[in-house]
């Protein structure tokens, strides 16, 4: 099992200076290689044989031209070279967009280094990093037992420093638990989700609540002269607001997903096309604020760790239009918040959709686990 753990670090002034030197050298390495590749491609793109025969620069060759690169971690420079090489390979395969030049004005700066001879390790309240030595770390959660650290990514964001550890450990096989409790979640723009028991997540909508404060600080930023000290300080203020919003959102989503995983054996959600939904201008801010895609990712890995099941209902399943009592499909307008059916059903439309998702999810679960088609929607709905 490969997993990532992120911790806050508090480097000294000397270590901060070396971290920023590493950021600059990694950026220089990436931009130099990108410029070379663009130049060679422009010269020889009509001559495939010459293009394929060209020997591109290596990190050791570039370090000979820029001797100050010897001061920083060599693994960080080699990783930047590998990242650019992979980015170009994926671009020519049509998987990604072309690589872009890195800027020193980017509010988030990172570099990645790999473990060699146990040079990345945690000892007490400190972490050992190449070239930096021991750095103070806020170890808010312990790493899994018998794990090995494969790589570390140092990041600066909003004036704070973090380290992301990529670890590898042996996964303990968890027994699949019996389905004692099942829940269906219907996505809600106002509260993140509504379940089939008519409980709401009551998401606080952090972004919308901070719009006035954010607009005020961004207005101040627009009045500053770009490149001045006051501009840099105000840009840091805006970055801290965005970072606080991100941390608040992640904290809420982690707690909500952990509660569901701890209390239910099977969790059923819709497989939504959020990119398509964001094209509607009236929903764009709410969809971005609730981050249902991130919430889904949290549920995926947490259910896997606990040996539980996350069932994704097909995106075109008519959960909102289907009656949870009789199974009849009725047309429902977006403005209609109450679902009514000729069978006498009269309930909230989100609650109705959540009950349908729970029923369909249980049907899909039994089909996957036991390979039976005898279970139908009518036997699962209640």
Image: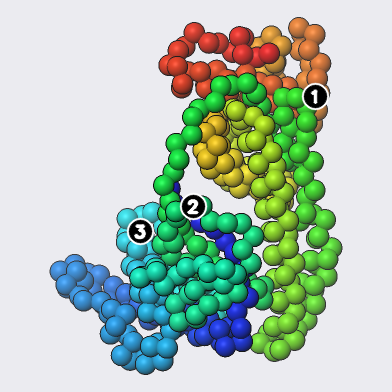
> How far across and how far down the image is residue 230, in percent?
75, 86
> How far across and how far down the image is residue 62, in percent?
32, 85
Q: Examine the rendered structure and indicate whether residue 14 appears above or below residue 6.
A: below
Camera sees residue 284: no
Q: Secondary structure at mark 3?
A: helix
Q: Residue at x 72, y 70 (%)?
A: 240
Camera sees residue 374: yes
Between 106 and 294, the residue placed more toward the observer is 294
Sequence-wise, the earlier of marks 1 and 3 is 3
Sequence-wise, the earlier of marks 3 and 2 is 3
Q: Secondary structure at mark 1?
A: strand
Q: Secondary structure at mark 2?
A: loop
Instruction: Report crowding for label 2: few under 14, some 14 to 19, many 20 or more residues within 10 A (C-alpha).
Output: few
Q: Residue at x 80, y 28 (%)?
A: 337
Find disc 3 in the rendering and name its residue: 90
Q: Residue furthest front?
A: 124
Q: How much space separates mark 1 and mark 3, taking CA atoms? A: 47 Å
Q: Examine the rendered structure and indicate whether residue 285 appears above or below residue 320.
A: below
> How far across and how far down the image is residue 16, in percent?
58, 83
Find disc 2 in the rendering and name its residue: 145
Q: How much space separates mark 2 and mark 1, taking CA atoms? A: 47 Å
Find disc 1 in the rendering and name its residue: 348
Q: Examine the rendered structure and indicate whether residue 363 appears above or below residue 336.
A: above
């Amino acid at each position: 099992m490969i997993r990532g753990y992120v911790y806050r670090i508090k480097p000294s002034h000397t270590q901060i200076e070396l971290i920023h030197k590493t950021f600059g050298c990694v950026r220089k390495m990436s931009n130099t290689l990108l410029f070379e590749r663009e130049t060679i491609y422009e010269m020889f793109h009509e001559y495939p044989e010459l293009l394929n025969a060209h020997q591109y620069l290596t990190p050791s060759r570039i370090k000979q031209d820029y001797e100050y690169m010897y001061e920083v971690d060599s693994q960080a420079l080699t990783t930047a070279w590998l990242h650019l090489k992979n980015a170009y390979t994926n671009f020519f395969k049509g998987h990604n967009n072309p690589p872009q030049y890195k800027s020193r004005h980017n509010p988030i700066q990172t570099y990645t280094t790999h473990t060699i001879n146990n040079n990345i390790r945690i000892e007490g309240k400190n972490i050992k990093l190449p070239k930096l030595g021991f750095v103070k770390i806020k170890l808010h959660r312990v790493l899994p037992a018998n794990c090995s650290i494969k790589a570390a990514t140092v990041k600066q964001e909003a004036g704070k420093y973090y380290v992301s550890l990529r670890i590898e450990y042996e996964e303990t096989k968890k027994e699949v638990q019996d389905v004692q409790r099942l829940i269906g979640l219907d996505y809600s723009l106002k509260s993140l989700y509504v379940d089939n028991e008519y409980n709401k997540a009551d998401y606080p909508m952090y972004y919308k609540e901070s719009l006035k404060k954010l607009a005020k600080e961004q207005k101040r930023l627009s009045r500053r002269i770009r490149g001045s000290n006051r501009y840099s300080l105000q840009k840091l203020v805006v970055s801290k607001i965005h970072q606080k919003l991100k941390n608040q959102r992640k904290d809420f989503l982690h707690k909500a997903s952990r509660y569901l995983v701890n209390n239910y054996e099977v969790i059923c959600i819709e497989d939504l096309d959020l990119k398509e939904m964001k094209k509607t201008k009236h929903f764009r801010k709410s969809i971005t604020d609730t981050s249902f895609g991130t919430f889904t990712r949290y549920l995926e890995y947490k259910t896997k760790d606990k040996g539980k099941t996350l069932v994704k209902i097909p995106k075109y399943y008519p959960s909102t239009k289907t009656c949870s009592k009789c199974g009849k499909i009725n047309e429902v307008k977006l403005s209609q918040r109450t679902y009514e059916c000729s069978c006498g059903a009269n309930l909230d439309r989100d609650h109705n959709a959540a009950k349908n998702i729970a029923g369909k999810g249980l049907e899909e679960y039994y089909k996957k686990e036991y390979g039976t088609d005898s279970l139908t929607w009518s036997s699962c709905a209640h």
